[in-house]
Image: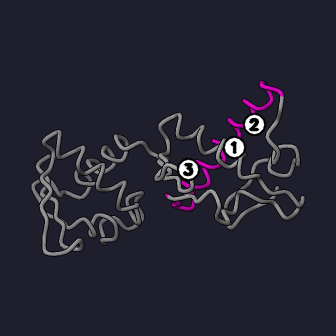
C-alpha cells in the first residue's frame, strides 16, 4: 500500500486506468465516486482547504505508475464534489476550488461545540484565536481556512449565537459568543 506523507492511499491509486476519465458511464460514475472520497479524505487529513486545478496537487499524479490526471479529469472530479455541496469554485474559470470537507453548517456546529467544551459561553475572542489560539490547538478548528471560518461565524451570527465586531485590522476582528 502506497503512502503520501502519513496518508494511506487506496488500491485504485496504483491502477493506471483510474488516471484517465473512463468512457463507460457506470465505470466513470464509480471512478468519480472513488476520486471524490479520496480528495475529501486527503484534504481533511492534511488540512487542505484550497486546490488549484492547474497546480501541482499531490493526488493528481502518481510517479510510481507514471500517470497524471488530465485537466479535464481534475475539473470533473472537483466539479462532482462541488455538486454535492462539499466544495465551491472560487472563480468562473474553475481554476481554484475551496474544499469543504465539513459543510459550513457542520463547521458552525464544531464552533459551538468548541465554545461549550472550553467554557467560552459569553466570552470574547478574536477570529485569529479561534484559528490558532491555545484552546483550538489539536482541534479541527486549528488552522481552519479564514474564509470558511468567517462564513460559519456569520451563519451563527444570523442564528443569534454570537456577534461579530471589527477592529482596526483583520487581526482585530472579534467574536462575542452568546450560546
Magenta-colored stretch includes residue 80: no
- What residue do we see at 88% from left, 49% from top? 16
Where residue 94 is drawn, which disc sits there?
3
Looking at the image, is mark 1 or mark 3 earlier in the sequence? 1
Give the residue pinned by disc 1. 35
Q: Using the numbered discs, state the Cα–Cα distance from disc 2 to disc 3 in whole angstroms.
A: 21 Å
Read off the magenta span. 24-49
User: Where residue 58 appears, x then y in whole percent?
Assistant: 69, 63
Residue 161 rendering spot, x and y as whole percentages: 15, 45
- x then y, percent, for residue 141: 37, 59
Q: Which mark sits nearer the N-terminus, 2 or 3?
A: 2
Judging depth in this view, the residue of 11 and 24 nearest the camera is 24
CB atoms of marks 1 and 2 within 8 Å: yes
In the rendered view, tell whether residue 161 sits above or below residue 118.
above
Disc number for residue 13: none
**Image location of residue 147, percent across then percent down:** 35, 57
Classified by dominant secondary structure, the portion drawn in magenta counts as helix
Classify residue 140 by image quadrant. bottom left
At 78% from the left edge and 24% from the top edge, which residue is drawn? 26
Q: Is residue 59 left or right of residue 113?
A: right
Describe the element under mark 3 as helix, strand or loop.
loop
**Relative to the observer, which residue lies in front, 77 or 173?**
77
Q: Label 1, label 3: how many angstroms apart (C-alpha)? A: 18 Å
List the residue tagged with mark 2. Answer: 31
| Residue at x 64% of width, y 46% of height | 75
Amino acid at each position: 500500500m502506497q503512502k503520501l506523507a502519513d496518508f494511506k492511499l487506496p488500491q485504485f491509486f496504483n491502477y493506471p486506468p483510474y488516471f484517465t476519465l473512463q468512457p463507460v458511464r457506470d465505470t466513470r460514475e464509480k471512478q468519480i465516486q472513488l476520486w471524490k472520497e479520496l480528495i475529501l479524505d486527503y484534504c481533511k487529513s492534511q488540512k487542505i482547504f484550497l486546490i488549484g486545478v492547474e497546480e501541482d496537487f499531490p493526488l493528481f499524479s502518481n510517479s510510481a505508475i507514471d500517470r497524471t490526471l488530465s485537466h479535464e479529469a481534475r475539473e470533473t472530479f472537483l466539479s462532482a464534489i462541488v455538486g454535492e455541496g462539499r466544495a465551491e469554485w472560487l472563480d468562473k474559470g474553475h481554476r481554484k476550488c475551496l474544499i469543504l470537507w465539513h459543510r459550513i453548517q457542520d463547521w458552525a456546529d464544531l464552533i459551538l461545540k468548541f465554545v461549550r467544551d472550553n467554557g467560552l459561553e459569553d466570552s470574547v475572542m478574536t477570529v485569529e484565536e479561534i484559528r490558532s489560539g491555545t484552546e483550538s490547538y489539536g482541534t479541527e478548528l486549528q488552522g481552519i481556512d479564514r474564509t470558511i471560518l468567517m462564513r460559519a461565524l456569520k451563519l451563527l451570527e444570523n442564528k443569534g449565537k454570537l456577534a461579530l465586531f471589527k477592529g482596526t485590522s483583520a487581526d482585530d476582528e472579534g467574536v462575542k459568543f452568546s450560546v
